[in-house]
Amino acid sequence: MARNKKRRIIIVGAGPGGLTAGMLLAARGFDVHIFEAKSTVGGRSARLQVGDFTFDTGPTFLMMDFVLREVFEATGRRLEDYLELMPLDPLYTLSFGDRDFRVTRDRERMRAEIERLFPGNSAGYDRFLREEGERFKALMPCLTREYSSLRSYLSPSLLRAVPHLSLGKSVFRNLSRYFDDEKLILSFTFQSKYLGMSAWECPALFTMLPYVEHEFGIAHVRGGLHQISSAMARAATESGATIHLATPVKQLTFEGDAVTGIELVNGGRERADAVVLNADFGHAMTKLVPPEKLRKYRPDKLAKMDFSCSTFMLYLGVNGRVPMDHHTIVFAKDYKKNVRQIFRDKVLPQDDFSFYVQNASVTDPTLAPAGKSALYVLVPVPNQSSGIDWHREAPEFRRRLLRLIEERTPLKNLEANIEVELLTTPQDWQERQNVYLGATFNLSHRWSQMLHRRPHNEFEEFRNCYLVGGGTHPGSGLPVIYESARIATDLISRRFGALPLRMSYGAQAPAHSS
């Protein structure tokens, strides 16, 4: 494809959104330059190497992989030429203390497991699949369009979807229609934490998330999900994009209310016809934009918006093979109290809290030396608006976490077998990863911060500025971040008259075979 040298696009940040945008724009013939502060691509989805052990920094669940496949196909590429996807079964194990629930995509096995652990609820599972499948089909088209004006609410796709929005209902309340056992309900609500929200507050439309897992499955990428970022960087450069690593951006540059380019920390200046922001939204508004340029998202107004929870992380290189599934979620004994502590009270849980363990080495032997395991441990905790002093609290919280892991999982001698370790707190997310308030899932997904009321893909504050990533529409999570980049790049292409790329935007999602 002939390259359009007349239109220069700068992308700030080489996270999943920025790399997707870079792939799509370069394939359309734009002169694309991606500026990344760190020495590697991926942002909070980057590769993390600790000794001889390899980890993903952030996301470990790959859902709706057909969206990723379409991104590659839109640029004339086959995903299989860049990545090896490994479907997982079971999807994950959910541990409640008195029972372990191994969740599978195989519907017959799933019905049998529900009847074994939660008698009488398998019919509700069938109804969940049927009704939430209808919701997904109605709402998916709404996630693939932009909402730059109130008129966008009159789009036929959104009007058709209104009955499926379940306005006024939460995910927990909606799932109570299908199941009568609280632990089974929780088994289909923990996905709200992907959005950094409580299941008792997360809008019911996001019941789509567990449906998507059961309908389309969850995949691992050989080598780790960070390989997606590496593959996207390779594809973008093959199409002519230039990626500038270890080149941090100081701020955007302006002429009036129009963004003209960027100023680099090293003093250099780069001009562009349009700038795509893939930096964390709160960080960008408080650090990359002169405050006098902002109106709607001034720092004082930003501080009043609702942001997601944060995460406390342990990346552990462990001696021995760990007898656990690829994904295990351990629920606090008093789960509702734990959620309230994180999201409402914003206090640090003490002796009873939920946590997640990824044991990817059981699926992918490339992540750890022979006979050893790479463990990724995540605890949802309050973001930095809590005022928690992590310099003081982190050592004791780590101790309590390791004790809980040894009590609630097969890892009975975990601490004695740790060979290498890296600890990350919400303060680290904020200071080292440039995540505003350490809110790892970005802006929350309350109704007041969705669709037209979420920062727009064609940013409403300035001309020539576009947003991609979890802080804009459609929201956080890898598949919808890819969609944010697709929406933004379509807007840029229409503006400059570039040829559109053919994408079905999920229409080719594979059907489930029962």
Image (spheres, rainbow, N blue to C red):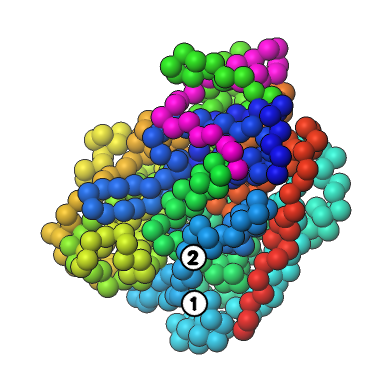
Foreground residue, 451 or 42? 42
Label of residue 466 in the image: none
Mark 1, other Cα within 10 Å: few <14 / some 14–19 / many ≥20: many
Look at the image and tell me whether residue 165 can be seen.
Answer: no
Can residue 514 be seen from the camera position used here? yes
Which of the 4 image quarters holds residue 245?
A: top left
The residue carrying mark 2 is 85
User: Quadrant location of residue 509?
Assistant: bottom right
Task: Give the percent coordinates (x, y) of residue 132.
Answer: 67, 68
Can you tell which of label 1 and label 2 is closer to the viewer? 2
Does residue 152 appear to the left or right of 358 in the view shown?
right
Query: In the rendered structure, which amino acid carries the disc numbered 1?
Result: Thr
Name above or below for residue 158 compared with residue 306.
below
Q: Would you say residue 145 sits in the magenta stretch?
A: no
Q: Residue furthest front?
A: 2
Q: CA distance from mark 1 to mark 2?
A: 18 Å
Circle nearer the N terminus (1, 2): 2
> Measured along the vertical axis of the image, is residue 226 above or below residue 244?
below
| Kind of element beneath mark 2 | strand
**Residue nearer the viewer, 369 or 438:** 369
x 34%, y 36%: residue: 428
What numbered label is drawn on residue 104? 1
| Residue 14 x, y percent position in the rendering | 50, 38
Q: Residue 247: x, y in percent?
A: 44, 26
Q: Is residue 239 above or below residue 137?
A: above
Span highlighted in magenta in the image:
239-261
Q: Quadrant of the C terminus?
A: bottom right
Q: Amino acid at mark 2?
A: Leu
Q: Say if the magenta span includes residue 249.
A: yes
Q: Give the prevailing secondary structure in the magenta stretch.
A: strand
In-image side of 279 versus 325 (left or right): right
